[in-house]
Every structure is written in structure tokens, then in C-alpha cells.
């Protein structure tokens, strides 16, 4: 009996082209994107038609979550350390070098200054979990927020202040922050929004 | 593609004949690794930078208060941001005895925007014209910006006060941050050059209350005045 001959076919697929494509994609992502900053709370910013982009460096971002808790993030590590030192001498709270080092690496902070040393002693994963329960005090009796911003401005005059607040935040909380900024003569600042397209009639023009 | 031809001058085969060898490089692991990296970058990075709105607030100095009072009555529009995404406005001076002087509006295109575009017609038309000229490349970006700033200073263009209602004792019934941004957005869309965020007054709250009760509180003013 004649055997049916099955022709052996090579199943090798040439992956070179595929590799080319993936490398290209990878390069694109590496060059165009920026890393997501770790934030203590997720906020959804309101949308606006404004198209101005926020600068990348020298930004002091004030994060306001819906219940009015305030967090601050500074983008430069040396700024963070200098500001912490200024605050520690002002409020008479001393920090150990390890605590300062931990503060340098933390992206955003928002703990009353009296509780700061204890908070910095915690492990970083516990810090991440509990940070959202704190918030910088910003009321008429104890306005630490004002002092933080003042110290940051003194340390770096090029700083731009950006307010990032959740869209459902009551106006009272925003007003509180705005009037605190007004008190220390910070009259120009940015409000972070997400992009909304212009109304149709405007676009046609 | 991924094969390299190597000339082999080995002794196999006939003498003098070159043997062709094909070396295949398998790129599959390379692709696997790249895919992993791409996934990592897609999840851990953002492509879009957040948008921002630049505002400058008045200083706490007394000078600005005097300047505020200088605003002509015919130019002034006061926008009151109420609770539950409601918005009201009145033109010129508040008329406490007449509850119809306060008008309820909306954040939509036919609300505040219609009013402001109508009131700010000259400036809007000027800016439109400038945009057209920029499109035709008659003027460059820098002159466009300076001309727009100039156009916004036109006399007779409205001056808008934005007043947001604060929450009551229970922390409810106040305006939200989104309301404020929406109102500021209308200023940008309608090319309003002069606007300010001002604290709400007792009188403004009274106006809203009176509007809701359809003028029932107007009698109180009369009796209060008579006494």
C-alpha cells in the first residue's frame, strides 16, 4: 500500500517584523508619556474649555478632596526638604535624618505638623493607606496650609500654585483655600481642569 | 529576514564549492519582552497633561474695593451660584423689593452664555474677526493675543461678578467647585475681560430666598422701611 505522503511544512513564523513594530510602539510610549503621580486620593477634576497646559516643573499642587481635606505636592526633592526644615523650625518640631529622608521621597504630604514625625516613622505602605485620613489644617485658628505655601514660596520664588479639586467639593472649602492664599498675597494661581471641547458655534468660527 | 547567510568554506561537499548555511534567529522572546514593556508603560503613564485655568484674584487691600464700586450700573452683571446646580443673575444694582429682577438661568448654552454673548456682542464680534484674521495668517500669535486683550478692554463691555452660595450649618445647599469652574468657563467662552469672584452678601441670599417664595418676602422690606 502506498502511504499518503504528508509534506512537512515548517511552522516557523518570522517574528522580526513584529519585533520592529513593538519596539517602535515602546519608543513612542517612552518618549511621549509621563509617569502617573501617586496621589493620596483620586479626584475627578471638572472640565473646562481652557487649553493652557500646566508647566512640568516648579509646581506646587494643592489637592482638595470632596470633604475638604488638603494635600500638597512639590515636584522637587530638595524643595521638599528645605520646606520641611523651615516648617520644623517654625513649629518647633524636630526631625531625625531618616524622617527627613522619608519625607524627601514622599510625593505628596498632608499631615498636621505635630503628627508628622510619628507619621514618617510608619512603614511606607501604612503611610499610603493612612495619609488620606489626615489633611493639612486650614482654618482660622490653625492655618498650617498658609505656612507651608509661604515656606515653599520663600524657598523657590518661581513656584506656580495649582489647585486640583474634585468637582463635587463644596465652594466653602475652595473659598477657604483661596482666602488663605489671598492672605499671603498669592493672587495668581491655576485651577486644574480636564479638557472639554468648545461649543459647536465657537468651533465653526 | 532574520536569517544570515554564512559562506562556509568547510571541507564538506565538493572541493571548491561553497556551502550555504542559514542561521535563523528566533525573535519570539524579544517580542514577548517588548509586549510586556509596552503593557507596563501603558498602565503606569499618562499621555495627557492636565489642563489649567489661570485666574488672578484681587488682593485684600482696600483699593480694590473702591474700584469695584466704580463699575457702571449698566455694565454690571452679578451671577449667583446657588445650590443644586442652580444659577441666578441680576443686572446692575439689586432691587430687593422686586423679586422678578432676579432671573434663574442655567449653565447650558441657552442660559448664561446666551445672555453674556448678547451683552458682550461688540467684544465677541471683535474677537471673532481677529480669529478669522489669524486663520488667514494676516496676524501672528503674539499680535493676536495682544489685540484680543485690547478688545476685551472695550468700554461698555460687561463686568461680571461671580458670587457663590456658601453651605449652611449642616454643610449642605452650597455651590460646588464645578459650578464655579462652569461659571468661569462661560467667561472664557464669552470673551469677558473683566470678571471677579466676590463673596456673597446677605442681600444676595435674600434675593434668592425672595425669588423662591415668589416675592412673599417683599412685604417685609416695606414694613421694615416704614418702621
Image: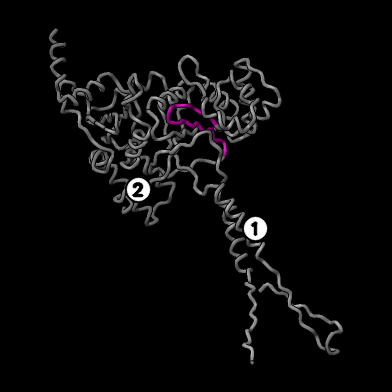
Instruction: Give the x, y percent position of residue A7.
Output: 63, 84
- The mark found on residue A93 in the picture is none
Residue B37 vertical position relative to residue A159 in the rendered view, above or below: below
Q: Residue B33 has which mark?
A: 1
- Residue located at (60% from left, 22% from top): A116
Image quarter hosting the N terminus of chain A: bottom right
Residue that badge 2 annotates: A198
Does residue A15 sit above or below A90 in this rendering?
below
Q: Position of residue B200 (x, y in %)?
A: 31, 23
Q: Nearer the viewer, residue A43 or B210?
A: A43
Q: Measured from the top left, where is residue A164 in percent x and y? A: 46, 34
| Residue A203 or residue A72, whichever sits in front | A72
**What secondary structure is marked by label 2?**
loop
Residue A129, percent across and down? Answer: 56, 31
Membership of A62 in magenta stretch: yes
The structure residue drawn at horizontal position 38% and vertical position 28%, both measured from the top left corner, is: A170
Disc 1 crowd rating (10 Å Cα; few below 14, some 14-19, many 20+) is some
Residue projecting furthest to the bottom: A1
Residue under the image location 47 percent in, 14 percent down: A141
Q: Residue B215, located in which quarter of the rendered image?
A: top left
In the image, is residue B179 above or below residue B67? below
Chain to which mark 2 belongs? A
Q: Is residue A64 left or right of residue A29?
A: left
Q: Is residue A151 left or right of residue B157?
A: right
Q: Residue at x 62, y 84 (%)?
A: A6
Q: Is residue B63 magenta?
A: no
Q: Which residues are magenta?
A: A57-72
Callouts 2 and 1 in the same chain: no
Q: Spatial distance from mark 2 to mark 1, Cα to Cα?
A: 42 Å
- Asked if one can make out residue A47 in the rendered structure from this viewpoint, the answer is yes
Q: Residue furthest top?
A: B227
On the question of residue A157 being in view, the answer is no
Amino acid at each position: 500500500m502506498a502511504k499518503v505522503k504528508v509534506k512537512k511544512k515548517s511552522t516557523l513564523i518570522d517574528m522580526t517584523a513584529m519585533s520592529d513594530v513593538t519596539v517602535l510602539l515602546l519608543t513612542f510610549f517612552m518618549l511621549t508619556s509621563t509617569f502617573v503621580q501617586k496621589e493620596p486620593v483620586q479626584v475627578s477634576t471638572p472640565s473646562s474649555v481652557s487649553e493652557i497646559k500646566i508647566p512640568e516643573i516648579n509646581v506646587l499642587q494643592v489637592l482638595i478632596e470632596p470633604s475638604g481635606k488638603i494635600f500638597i505636592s512639590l515636584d522637587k526633592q530638595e524643595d521638599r526638604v528645605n520646606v520641611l526644615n523651615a516648617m520644623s523650625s517654625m513649629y518647633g518640631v524636630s526631625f531625625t535624618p531618616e524622617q527627613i529622608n522619608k519625607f524627601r521621597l514622599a510625593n505628596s504630604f498632608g499631615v498636621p505638623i505635630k503628627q508628622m514625625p510619628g507619621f514618617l516613622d510608619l512603614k511606607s505602605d501604612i503611610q499610603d493607606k493612612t495619609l488620606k485620613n489626615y489633611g493639612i489644617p486650614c482654618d482660622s485658628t490653625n492655618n498650617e496650609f498658609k505656612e507651608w505655601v509661604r515656606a515653599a514660596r520663600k524657598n523657590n520664588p518661581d513656584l506656580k500654585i495649582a489647585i486640583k479639586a474634585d468637582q463635587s467639593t463644596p465652594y466653602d472649602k475652595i473659598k477657604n483655600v483661596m482666602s488663605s492664599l489671598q492672605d499671603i498675597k498669592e493672587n495668581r494661581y491655576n485651577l486644574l481642569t480636564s479638557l472639554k471641547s468648545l461649543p459647536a458655534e465657537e468651533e465653526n468660527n | 529576514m532574520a536569517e544570515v547567510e554564512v559562506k562556509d568554506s568547510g571541507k564538506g561537499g565538493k572541493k571548491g564549492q561553497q556551502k550555504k548555511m542559514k542561521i535563523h534567529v528566533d525573535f519570539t522572546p524579544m517580542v514577548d519582552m517588548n509586549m510586556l514593556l509596552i503593557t507596563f508603560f501603558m498602565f503606569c503613564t499618562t499621555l495627557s497633561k492636565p489642563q489649567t485655568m489661570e485666574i488672578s484674584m484681587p488682593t485684600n487691600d482696600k483699593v480694590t474695593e473702591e474700584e469695584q464700586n466704580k463699575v457702571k450700573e449698566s455694565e454690571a452683571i452679578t451671577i449667583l451660584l446657588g445650590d443644586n446646580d442652580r444659577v441666578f443673575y441680576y443686572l446692575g444694582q439689586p432691587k430687593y423689593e422686586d423679586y422678578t429682577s432676579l432671573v434663574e438661568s442655567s449653565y447650558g448654552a441657552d442660559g448664561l452664555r446666551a445672555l453674556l454673548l448678547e451683552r458682550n456682542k461688540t467684544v465677541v464680534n471683535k474677537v471673532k474677526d481677529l480669529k478669522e484674521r489669524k486663520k488667514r495668517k494676516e496676524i501672528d500669535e503674539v499680535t493676536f493675543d495682544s489685540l484680543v486683550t485690547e478688545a476685551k478692554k472695550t468700554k461698555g463691555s460687561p463686568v461680571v461678578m461671580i458670587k457663590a452660595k456658601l453651605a449652611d450649618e449642616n454643610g449642605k445647599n452650597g455651590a460646588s467647585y464645578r459650578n464655579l469652574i462652569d461659571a468661569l468657563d462661560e467667561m472664557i467662552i464669552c470673551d469677558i475681560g473683566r470678571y471677579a469672584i466676590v463673596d456673597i452678601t446677605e442681600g444676595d441670599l435674600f434675593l434668592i430666598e425672595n425669588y423662591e417664595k415668589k416675592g412673599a418676602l417683599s412685604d417685609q422690606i416695606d414694613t421694615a422701611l416704614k418702621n
